[in-house]
Amino acid sequence: MRYVTLIFLLFHSLCAEIIHYETGCSAARSKAFRILDSVEVRFAPWYGIPFEGVSDLACDRKDYRLYAVSDRGWLYRLQLVIEDAKIKRVELAGAVTLTDAKGNDLDGKKWRDAEGMTLASDWLLVAFERKPRIILYRPDGRFVEKVKLPKPLGKAKRYRGKNSMLESVAWHPRYGLITAPEQPLEKSDASLHTLYAKKKRWKIPASGSLTAIETTAKGNILILERNYDWITGERSVHLSLIRIAECKKRCVKETIATLSTTEGCRLDNFEGLTRLEGNRYLMISDDNGSPLQKTLLVLFEISE
């Protein structure tokens, strides 16, 4: 069996592709943002689980291990190698289906639609759409417990749609779990996103669909918003810094970068974000399982 496994891993490595991808956004859009590298990643299926539909990332900074979650309910383990501010290697080290409280694989779009993920100590927090919830998982994809959501996020009818629910989650050393819907709730001001913690809320001016949040090295929040025009096909990505310790009734949103296809950027469906070390981050796009789209990894750094 050991030799079969070795042969499989060798075959898998031969089927993996890491392709340099020029975004066209190499020039800094602000003094606080710089793209370091960008690649397209492709992997052969891992024991029948395809690598597709990746919606978020989480980084274990102890060993540069990455976790990626798919909106099909799959959890991937990736090994990342960065040298001289370049992505030298990304290897798929495993893939599993997330489980429910009874140990069964999640089944059906309503239950499998994982959209946000973060690492909290040695556990993974995964946020879901359609059936809005946040679940604590072991790194092997096994269910640990359901996390109590900040009010009023537990009821699906309060969201603007089944595809506008919990898209992002982060862990903050002071405030603990922070999450946010992709769109403001149905009866709230559509021009303001809200970040929710157990005992705090922060209002933020909206610039698009909120698809990822991440805690920075200094305890601020980096948010990722995207826009897509279904008629023209134009895309844009907004990265902004929120100094939540300084927020009053509304937070001031500091634009770190605005990237747009109208300015020559070659963008895809960016949904995921994770901090590596210091002020370096990875952003990933969801290919929606479509041969017309790509899974892109963008390595960038910011200044706070």
Image (cartoon, helix red, strand yellow):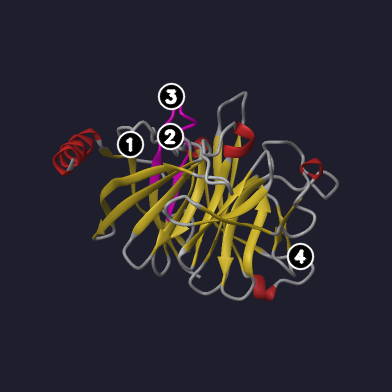
- For the residue pair 294 and 46, the one nearer the viewer reads as 46
**In x, y percent, where is residue 54?**
46, 41
**In x, y percent, where is residue 271?**
53, 44
Q: Badge 1: few (under 14), some or many (20 or more) residues near its Cα, within 10 Å?
A: some
Q: Which residue is mark 4?
A: 250
Q: Is residue 21 left or right of residue 264?
A: left
Residues rendered magenta in the picture:
282-297
Can the viewer see residue 162 in this picture?
A: yes
Instruction: Give how far apart the Cα atoms at labels 4 and 3 are.
Output: 40 Å
Mark found first going from the N terminus, 3 or 1: 1
Q: Which mark is residue 46?
A: 1
Magenta region includes residue 234: no
Q: Nearer the viewer, mark 4 or mark 1?
A: 1
Q: Which mark is residue 292?
A: 3
**In x, y percent, where is residue 44?**
30, 32
Instruction: Give how far apart the Cα atoms at labels 2 and 4 are.
Output: 37 Å
Mark found first going from the N terminus, 2 or 3: 2
Residue at point 31%, 64% (across, down)? 63
Instruction: Give how far apart the Cα atoms at labels 3 and 1 are.
Output: 22 Å
Q: Which residue is mark 2?
A: 52
Q: Nearer the viewer, mark 4 or mark 3?
A: 3
Q: Is residue 92 left or right of residue 294?
A: left
Q: Is residue 277 left or right of residue 98?
A: left
Mark found first going from the N terminus, 4 or 3: 4
